[in-house]
Image (tube, grey):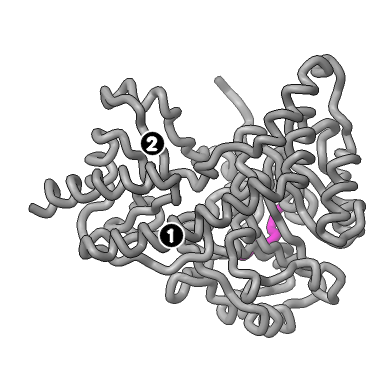
Amino acid sequence: MKLHISDNIKSLIPYPPGKPLKELEREYGVTNSIKMASNENSLGPSPKAMAAIAQCLAGLHRYPDGSCHYLAQALAEKLGVKMDELVFGNGSNEVIDFLVRAFVSTGCEVITSHPSFLVYQTMVQARDGINIVVPLQDMAHDLDTIATKVTDKTSLIFLDNPNNPTGTVFDRPTFESFLAKIPETVVVVLDEAYVDFVDPAIRLDVRDYIHGSTSVVGLRTFSKAYGIAGLRVGFGIMNSEIAGYLHRVRQPFNVNELAQVGALACVQDDDHYNKTMAMTRDGIAWLSAKITALGCHVFPTHTNFFLVDVGCDGKELYENLLHQGVIIRPMSAYGYPSYIRITVGTKAENERLITSLITALEEIKG
């Protein structure tokens, strides 16, 4: 076909989704697999969300609330922000897309780190923007170097805090020192997909910065702590002026009815949230000790996942575990060939992982 496609689109590499669990089981001839690769909530969805969704099924012939009014009302009250300081999306991914569409045009520069969430750079390239990529330093964002990369063409800076895949965070003094170097023309985006898992004693609060001289936007999701990744609903916290620009590029009815109802129920389900936090803390501590005892290096984390240097080919280990029905994430695509990333599971899943990991390491290392 003779299509007119720009070079920035032609050279894009689509985001590689993981194979469905059933397809992996069919391919590898295994059953009862456990998935500890995608940083999902192993406890499952909020029971209140499931009940609320079941009650609204008869109304699916109607369009959803285009403003997410009731969800915005409940969340604004819980977070202590105004309703017009919240923007909802089909996952926080879509809010990233709004930011790029609103603030990036041909020739604009966007600063990100490597490794971090791959979607930032993909969306910038799709808008014909210029990606300025700064390597992590000691597994964390190099904020000092990032600040030196800002030019009059810089429109956005994306910082996933905690970082994915390393699980590291930066503290309040470090962030405030960084912000002091950033001009008012730049929007700093804190992607806080995993913020719920950060110890409150060291956790940044984006609400303290959304009205500062440098514009700061926080991104959050219901996919992780609340366990409704399949519904795809996330949100941004920002000043109302930035929110207004994002609404200009937002499609109507972008958050479906089930997602809105489920997320609203999640906001009110402290019991499920607290159980998730406890399971994650206990699982991180138990798994870290067990994997360290196997001679692997476990990196500290502030999320529901952690990196492990297994001292061998991480992709080979991944394949071995797949044949045992255990799915983890190899990190070779991020430049860490001997690393794997593991999501905390339930007690039973964690125990099965350790048993399978012992077998895999023995077979690979001898």
Which quarter of the figure is the N terminus placed in?
A: top right
* Magenta stretch holds residue 302: no
* Magenta stretch holds residue 109: yes
Magenta-drawn segment:
106-111
* Residue at horizontal 67 percent and vertical 79 percent from the top: 172
Whether residue 57 is visible: yes
Binning the other alpha carbons within 10 Å of mark 1 as few (below 14), some (14 to 19) or many (20 upward) gives many
Is residue 109 placed above or below 29 in the rendered structure?
Answer: below
Q: CA distance from mark 1 to mark 2?
A: 17 Å
Pick the residue in front: 114 or 81: 81
Residue 260: percent from the left, percent from the top? 78, 35
Residue 212: percent from the left, percent from the top? 84, 75
* Residue at horizontal 39 percent and vertical 23 percent from the top: 23
Answer with left or right where residue 338 lies relative to residue 219: left
Q: Amino acid at mark 1?
A: Ile
Q: Amino acid at mark 2?
A: Ile
* Residue at horizontal 21 percent and vertical 64 percent from the top: 295
Whether residue 127 is visible: no
Pick the residue in front: 206 or 271: 271
Instruction: Please tell me how many numbered marks the rendered image carries.
Output: 2
Q: Which mark is residue 34?
A: 2
Binning the other alpha carbons within 10 Å of mark 2 as few (below 14), some (14 to 19) or many (20 upward) gives many
Residue 305: percent from the left, percent from the top? 46, 55
Residue 335 found in image quarter: bottom left
Q: Secondary structure at mark 2?
A: strand
Answer with left or right where residue 198 lies relative to residue 53: left
Residue 35 found in image quarter: top left
Q: Which residue is mark 1?
A: 284
